[in-house]
Image (cartoon, rainbow, N blue to C red):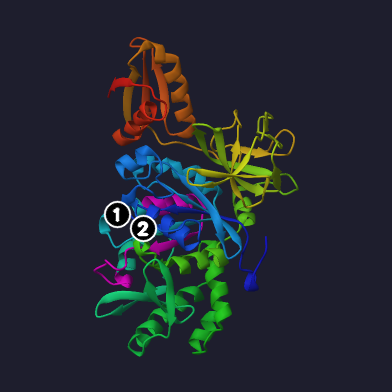
Amino acid sequence: MGTRAGGRRTGPKCIAIVGPFASGKTTLLEAILARMGAIPRQNPVSSGNTVSDHSPEARAHAMSVEATFATTEFMGEQLTFVDCPGSIEFSFEAEPVLAACDIAVVVAEADEKKIPALQLIMRKLDDLGVPRIMFLNKVDKAISGVRDTLKMLQPASSVPLLLRQIPLRKNGVVIGSIDLALERAYIYREYAESEVAQIPSDDKARELEARFSMLETLADHDDQLMEQLLEEIEPPKDAIFDDLAADLRDGAVTPVLIGTAEKGNGVLRLLKTIRHDAPDVEATRKRLGAPDGNATVVQVMKTIHTAHGGKLSVSRILAGQLADASELFLSNGTTAKVSGIYKMLGKDQTKLASARAGDTVALGKLDDVTTGQTLSSAKGGIKPLVTLMPPQPVFAFALRPKERKDEVKMSAAIQRLAEEDPSLSLRHNQDSAETVLSGHGEMHLRVVRERLEGKNQIPVEGHA
């Protein structure tokens, strides 16, 4: 991977977007894609035309029900964003994604009721060792100040929430932000790049206080910076950026950026922070314990059965390169031949000739491969890098086709749905001739039923 001054990372990256239900994750992804030029305009979630939440079930319930992948370029670098569901019933979708991503963007807001859900997400990131940035969303609607909000959210995080920006207000209304590292103001413009400005004199004291607080936290891991602060010496900006990047990659802090995704505000600063400061695939490979060497290593993040293209295994290339028609090996020695490599943008795919380390791509027709598995070009495969442990089901639903002629068709469809959703459990009740589905709530199993009847065109009947 390439580097920038001070060891700042560039190259293909994979970024998971996580956060409590209705915090604005899908809206943020839409704003990101619009800012990167991947889509002509930012569509509101209510329009039903967002890149993410493209399935009929997601649109019917106005919520994300599966992970959605979107790959595009920013400043010459390929970035893949994965919009992960916020509902606890669909939260397991994020687990295989988080394992293989480089960084997570945690979307949060000034809502005390969402702290328990936020805490669960932060704990999962701790368990997996995934660095994270917090995007404090909806700052234009927040009643409390940003620092008061962070005090409220801090108990959800095991490491300091490090404020990198503060709001810029005029007559009590948020009109922009002040970047504490750059010491520069940005005036928001809806759905457009912010206007760079000088920090207003009335806000200078507030900026200096917040900046010193940021530097004090960074100094906890930098003795030279601590000495400079004690001696009232202004540290070089490059050194500050290096500390911000290093502490993010080491998981020592969670940098906090602010904005309003609904209006596209704060998105460009977030993208630049990801591009320059987030760890690269080499760090992710080491975190997962992938072996050194020249072998290609692939981690499967999601399984999708498309209507016309068949089975797709959305995967992260952790090491090496991959060409179409390549042979890969599972850990049990089974051979899997790639039949198509695709870049994803929601439901749309673009065929590629090859993929390299860092890329997130969909691989076609790997029939024996399931979500969470590790593949390698090394003969005999390598030890699995990820172990998926779905939580215990809490809700069950028994169903059968309305017409007996659909029994075989329904059985095959349910098996495909279970491949797409590893948290779904199946068993057959021979006495009642019903299939019993077990999952993580009524909505979880309702969506499964809707997919059977909609996507697979199988009328069913059942009961809890």
Chain part drawn in magenta: 119-148
Which dot marks residue 114? 1
> Which is nearer the N-term, disc 2 or disc 1?
1
Residue 98: horizontal and vertical position, in percent?
Answer: 50, 48
Residue 158 location, quadrant: bottom left
Q: Quadrant of the C terminus?
A: top left
Residue 62 lies left or right of residue 406; in this view the side is left
Q: Is residue 416 left or right of residue 329?
A: left
Magenta region includes residue 128: yes
Query: For residue 172, what is the image quadrant?
Result: bottom left
Residue 164 makes an appearance in the image: no
The mark found on residue 156 in the picture is 2
- Report whether 425 appears left or right of 275: left
Asked whether 104 or 292 is in front, the reply is 104
- Name the amino acid type tagged 2: Ala
**In the rendered structure, does residue 1 fall within the stretch colored magenta?**
no
| Residue in the picture at 55% in, 33% down | 309
Query: Is there any visible trace of residue 194 in the rendered image?
Result: yes
Image vertical order of residue 158 relative to residue 101, above or below: below
Q: Secondary structure at mark 1?
A: helix
Query: Which quadrant does the N terminus fall into?
Result: bottom right
